[in-house]
Image: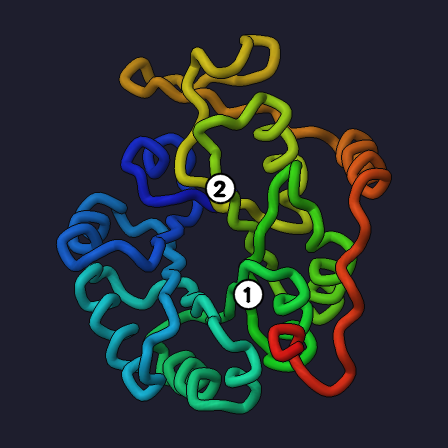
Amino acid sequence: MLLGGQREVAVALPSLLVLEEDLGESELREVGKRSDGMPRLMILAEPAFMRRLRADILRRIDWMGGGPPEAVLLRAEDVSELKGGMALQTLLDLRSSGAIGSFGFMHDDVRSVEWLVENTGPFVLGMPWSRDDQQAAYRAVPKALEYGIDCLGVAGGCATWTGDDWAFALGGCARILTAVDRLPSRSALPPTHARLIDDAALDVALPLPWDEAQMEVQWDRYQQSHQPPEPLPRSRPPMGE
């Protein structure tokens, strides 16, 4: 499970801190002080001028300290510019120099994510993912896994999630890891649906994940009410249609 940068999350479930692009210098310095060497994944917005990308990444790493992040994800605007372009070359150079562990891209449109799988060769791909939005499971996730690309599901609205939403997010971690901005409180889930963290200072519960059979049931239900994304165009990215 991949988690956002809240302090209680870092203590509750030592995993991977996902640092959103809207974190400023003071916030990144604070994360660096308090994350105790945890692995980190940094998300960056695509800069207005791509020649600034290298400096932007290195500056944020310097603010946070603690050595290279495990991965950097660039939130793409126009995916067509990533194929063999300056962004891809910059990320490859940073990885080769040891400044970052690996890299990838993310997009809010699953067809664009599918295009990124086939045309850019990233190590990680970020995409929308939740129990109510499983569009990526039709083609983007299977194709990514076929190429050995790790999948990061970016979920919104976690504050209103039910126990089933949490069980789904945890149950799917074998194929796609879910980044969330908070964990459910003890009062949000019934005792039969969660195991509590053994720390009285934390009002946090960790949901029990669904097993493979339960995840298949959810996927079958989703397909009954949701059509797959339109096929990709042959000669251009989907956003160019």
Marks 1 and 2 in Cβ contact (< 8 Å): no
Q: Which of the 4 image quadrants contains residue 68?
A: bottom left
Residue 190 vertical placement versus 32 (above, below): above
- Residue drawn at (63%, 50%), measured in percent from left and top? 176
Where in the figure is residue 168, as x and y percent of width and height? 65, 33
- Residue drawn at (32%, 84%), measured in percent from left and top? 49
Q: Which of the 4 image quadrants contains residue 8?
A: top left
Residue 171 vertical placement versus 55 (above, below): above
The residue furthest front is: 241
Where does label 1 land, which residue?
124
Quick one: SS at disc 2? loop
Where in the figure is residue 144, as x and y percent of width and height? 69, 65
The residue furthest left is: 26
Q: How many marks?
A: 2
The residue furthest top is: 191
Quick one: SS at disc 1? strand
- Residue drawn at (78%, 39%), measured in percent from left and top? 222
- Residue drawn at (50%, 70%), measured in percent from left and top? 104
Residue 6 or residue 139, whichever sits in front: 139
Where in the figure is residue 4, as x and y percent of width and height? 38, 44
Where in the figure is residue 44, as x and y percent of width and height? 36, 66
Residue 137 vertical placement versus 173 (above, below): below
| Among numbered discs 1 and 2, the one appearing first in the sequence | 1
Instruction: Name the mark nearer the viewer: 1 or 2.
Output: 2
Q: Mark 1: few, some, or many residues within 10 Å (few <14, many ≥20)?
A: many
Residue 156's tag is: 2
Q: Is residue 25 left or right of residue 161?
A: left
Q: Quadrant of the C terminus?
A: bottom right
| Distance of label 1 from label 2 (alpha carbons) | 19 Å
Q: Mark 2: few, some, or many residues within 10 Å (few <14, many ≥20)?
A: some
- The amino acid beneath tag 2 is Gly
